[in-house]
Amino acid sequence: MSEARLPRYVRRGRPSPGPAWAILTLFWVANAWAQNPEEVARADALFDAGKSELSRGDWAAACALFRSSLALDASVSTRVKVARCLVNEGRLAAALDEYDRAFESTVGAGLPEARQQELQAVIRSESAELEARVPKLAVVVRPETTAITALLDGHEVSPGSLAELRLDPGTHEIVIRAPGFRDHRAAVEAKAGILAKFYVNLEPVASSPTILQPRTVTPAREAKRRGTTTPDQSTTSGSNQRVLGAIVGGAGLASLVVAGVFGIRTLALVDDSRDHCTPGTNECSQTGVDLVDQASRSQNIGFLLGGLGAALLGTGVILYVTAPAQSGSGHARALQPSVSIGGSF
């Protein structure tokens, strides 16, 4: 590839006459007028200075000059130089994005066909070689939900891009947020040339148990006026509430037992999957991936049953404890003994 810098419009080359060339000439002229000649001249000077620094092996100085040139005039050649700078800095994902932009810039840039094909061939070759080196991460979120906010190293990314994230080699922080679930935060290690699969199992936020307030029932006034005894309604209500509390608490206890069974099953599936996954990485065979998926589903069911069981058990205890106590005052008068004293002194 020639090292000469081509801006977004062409200044050299003698075309053959014809209607097609007339249309292209009008397009190039319009682009040329849109450019500031002074900025283009400074961009050329910076580009040439960057090439000089690069020939001396000073990548830092050369890349700074190339970036300054790109800010003034986004030519295809300068974008390629900046992409190579990013590769030298180890920012492989950013370099691949810059190569993509460079390729897009070759279309409609008014370049001669031969030059356009030459640039595109160089970009395809270098980006293909880089593509094989760029680490990629596939993030799988369970349970599936559309309301996801994803952060990569503190910057929000589109949930759709989680299927294949381009990363630079090194450690990165992934944060997944969803309504009704706890934030999931994890550090992942990206290795060159590796497509890793990362599973995120969201934990639901446990809801507080609903406290049922018992309703107080007072005895009828007519019964008080006559001095007769009537069945104590509060005693009956309290008895029913205690029965309801026992039923609800028992259901909660049963849910906790079932949740424990799913927890044991989850541990067993995870242990089985280790035989099909590479230790220290996220690389698994298809059997390992299936076992991890089953473990994830089992874990989610266990979490849901555990939260439900805790809520039911708490509600049952509250119902039982707050039930009105039995009262024996209604029968006190009927059971009171009568004592009489008789005899002669």
Image: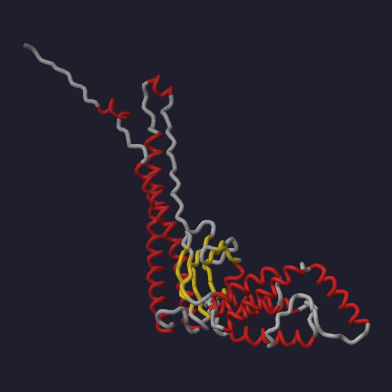
Between residue 127 and residue 85, name the one nearer to us. 85
Q: Position of residue 109 (x, y in %)?
A: 78, 77
Q: How many marks?
A: 0
Q: Position of residue 59 (x, y in %)?
A: 55, 78
Assign the C terminus to one quadrant of the image. Answer: top left
Assign the N terminus to one quadrant of the image. Answer: bottom right
Q: Is residue 283 left or right of residue 128?
A: left
| Model colouring | secondary structure
Q: Is residue 342 left or right of residue 34?
A: left
Q: Is residue 143 left or right of residue 160?
A: left
In percent of the image, x 43 and y 22: which residue is there?
222
Q: Give the quadrant of residue 281.
A: bottom left
Between residue 213 and residue 115, name the one nearer to us. 115
Q: Give the quadrant of residue 37.
A: bottom right
In percent of the image, x 49 and y 72: which residue is there?
199
In percent of the image, x 46 and y 64: which residue is there?
185
Q: Position of residue 296 (x, y in %)?
A: 47, 71
> Image height check: is 298 above or below 192?
above
Q: Give the quadrant of residue 31.
A: bottom right
Between residue 72 and residue 333, name the one nearer to us. 72
> Image height check: is 100 above or below 341?
below
Q: Position of residue 313 (x, y in %)?
A: 39, 53
